[in-house]
Image (spheres, rainbow, N blue to C red):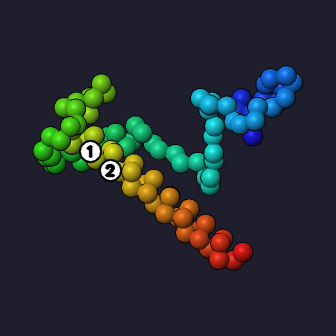
Amino acid sequence: MNRQVMPENYMFGRRPPFPLCNKDIRIVIGEPMMFDVPNLKKKAVDMSRDLSFSRAGWPPTTPCGLDEASQRYLYTTISEQIRRVMENLRNVSKSCLKTN
């Protein structure tokens, strides 16, 4: 466990009885996900030229200049990639449970 969460000498030379709050913990499962953000932004802008959406809480533009349609395309594309990876992990975990 992370030394920040459960330090060896926290109080009176002992570990804390519970993990400490407000500490960063990383849990890595499977391969890291990589996103080619500049390419995704370019594709979002290109694809959004033909799309129009009703405004539903999306900012009209972002600091990096993406309009609402581009933001929605980018959000949907990244979300779909994450969903696919999570679904694959779920299937792998199910198959591991069946074999044990």
The quarter in which the N terminus is drawn is top right
Looking at the picture, does residue 99 appear above or below residue 43?
below
Three-letter amino acid code at disc 2?
Thr
* Percent position of residue 87, x then y: 49, 63
Tell me where residue 80 sits by quadrant.
bottom left
User: Left of 15 or right of it: where is 42?
Assistant: left
Tell me where residue 19 sits by quadrant.
top right
Q: Is residue 43 visible?
A: no
Tell me where residue 84 sits by quadrant.
bottom left
The quarter in which the C terminus is drawn is bottom right
Q: Mark 2 — residue?
A: 76
Which residue: 34% across, 39% down?
41
> Marks 2 and 1, how far apart in space?
6 Å
In this view of the protein, which residue sits in the foreground, 36 or 6? Answer: 6
Looking at the picture, does residue 44 appear above or below residue 94?
above
Looking at the picture, does residue 26 appear above or below residue 20?
below
Three-letter amino acid code at disc 1?
Arg
The crowding category of the residue bearing disc 1, from other C-alpha atoms within 10 Å (few below 14, some 14 to 19, many at least 20), is some
- Say which mark, if any, is on residue 28: none
* Percent position of residue 28, x then y: 63, 47
Residue extending farthest to the top is: 12
Answer whether labels 2 and 1 touch (C-beta < 8 Å): yes
Which residue: 58% across, 48% down?
32
- Say which mark, if any, is on residue 72: 1
Residue extending farthest to the right is: 13
User: Left of 39 or right of it: where is 34?
Assistant: right
The crowding category of the residue bearing disc 2, from other C-alpha atoms within 10 Å (few below 14, some 14 to 19, many at least 20), is few
Mark 1 residue element: helix
In this view of the protein, which residue sits in the foreground, 70 or 6? Answer: 6
Mark 2 residue element: helix
Count of numbered labels shown in the rendering: 2
* Percent position of residue 23, x then y: 63, 30
